[in-house]
Image (cartoon, rainbow, N blue to C red):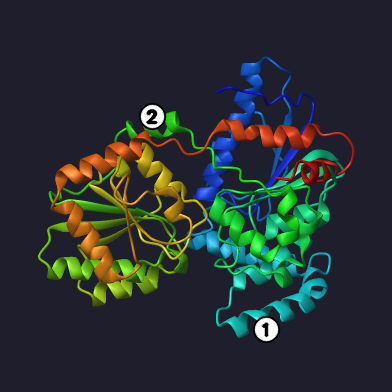
Amino acid sequence: MNSRFGVAGKKILFVINTMGKAGAETALLSLLRSLLQANKQAGREGCELYLYVLTGQGELIERIPPGVQLLNRRYKNLSVLSREGRRYLRRTVLRAMFRRGALFRQLPNMILSLAEMIKKGKIWPDKLLWRVLSEAGDRFDKEFDLAVAYLEGGSTYYVADHVKARKKAAFIHVDYTEAGYTRQLDQSCYLGYDAIFPISDEVKDSFLRIYPECAPQTRVFHNIIDRDEVLRRAAQGGGFEDSYDGIRLLTVGRLTWQKAYPTAIKAMALLKQADVKARWYILGEGSERKTLERQIESAGLREDFVLLGAVDNPYPYYAGADIYVHATRFEGKSIAIQEAQILGRPIIASDSSGNREQIVHDVDGLLCPLEPPAIRDAVLALISDPERRERLGRAAAEKRAGTEEDLVLLEELVTSSGERTWKREQERTCW
């Protein structure tokens, strides 16, 4: 790594909603490790890195690298997707409602945002509660040189309203409008940020359609993936434990609406009708598990569409899969696709925001409409052509997505002179 990250003695705070097993959390761990390694390689006195988890929950806390100080006064090492974890999270939300009058203070905006959601035809309960959790979050006397909201929603509101810092930056990991965010919900908080870092060009474009005035301080900051770590953990062994000898399809992602698993189930049913010897495995956990289990049972796919749950090390599963399928409604920039590429898997993905930016059709993967027949046809095309699968997998492994060079964006921000000047400096250089 060609490190230019020189911020000796600076205090940098990262805030994230949870530390569960998901893409943004994994990307944050890689970013923290890269920051520590950059200072070590440069032989400089390191910056002080701090982390605050808004919900105080998540199992990936065990993987926080030494040198990062957790600021939470209480923390529960529980997945937010497990039964016990969901109960704990509900208690956290209930406590938050009555702390500092959070519910009373945010109720008017919640009502307006709910009305807006109803008008659009989809209600996002978690989005409505992020402001309450932000209001109830811990407060710190410490002033930071840079405070980074690493995820949309709660962490972004918390850093904007309740953190003392010379500079503030916000990351955006999803298609802003597809994920259910609005200016009403945000209370236009992004206007107060010195820098905004979408993780891809499509995420940037989606955000700027809603916040066009933020263009001068908005620049893409790619996810940093620790390629060597992925390869190392893939070689540790484990993975599929059954003795199945047909084609293994794999999808990695939470069991949520965004991931469009009902469409995948229908596609698998069509594959079985075509008498294809294939089995589809899903790594991930989430709120839609029971609904999906009923759909799997109804489709007669109990042995063919397998919900494996969340696992500590998914990489041996990638390595053991014949085809990786990522048929989702939308993405920001999928960590799962990047991991599948590192491990040289042939990939089929829905032609949706985020996915299409990561895959060149029939060069390093296949893109198809998010429709069961289209997914079936893409799978059949790769099953029937092993040489094509091998070619796509090789091209995927050669891709280099995400670079530590983006650390320069943080360095420029934290070391720029004066209060809130980085934004004005970038306006003059006309990004």
Question: Could you tell me which residue is drawn at 80 percent across and 31 percent down?
Answer: 415
Mark 1: give few (<14), some (14-19) or many (20+) Cα within 10 Å: few
Q: Is residue 130 left or right of residue 88?
A: right
The percent coordinates of residue 194 (x first, y second) are 78, 47
Q: Residue at x 64, y 19 (%)?
A: 40
**Residue type, mark 2 in image:** Arg
Identify the element where label 2 is drawn. helix
How far from the left and from the top, in percent, is residue 379?
22, 58
SS class of the residue under badge 1? helix
Identify the residue under disc 2: 232
Q: Return the residue found at the far top.
A: 43
| Position in image of residue 133 (x %, y %) | 71, 62
Q: Nearer the viewer, residue 350 or 145?
A: 350
Please name which of the two marks, 1 or 2, marks the residue nearer to the observer: 1
Q: Which residue is mark 1?
A: 115
Sequence-first tag of 1 and 2? 1
CA gap between label 1 and label 2 equals 49 Å
* Residue 343 in sight: no
Q: Quadrant of residue 105?
A: bottom right
Side of 217 where 392 appears, left or right: left
Q: Is 347 situated above or below 42?
A: below
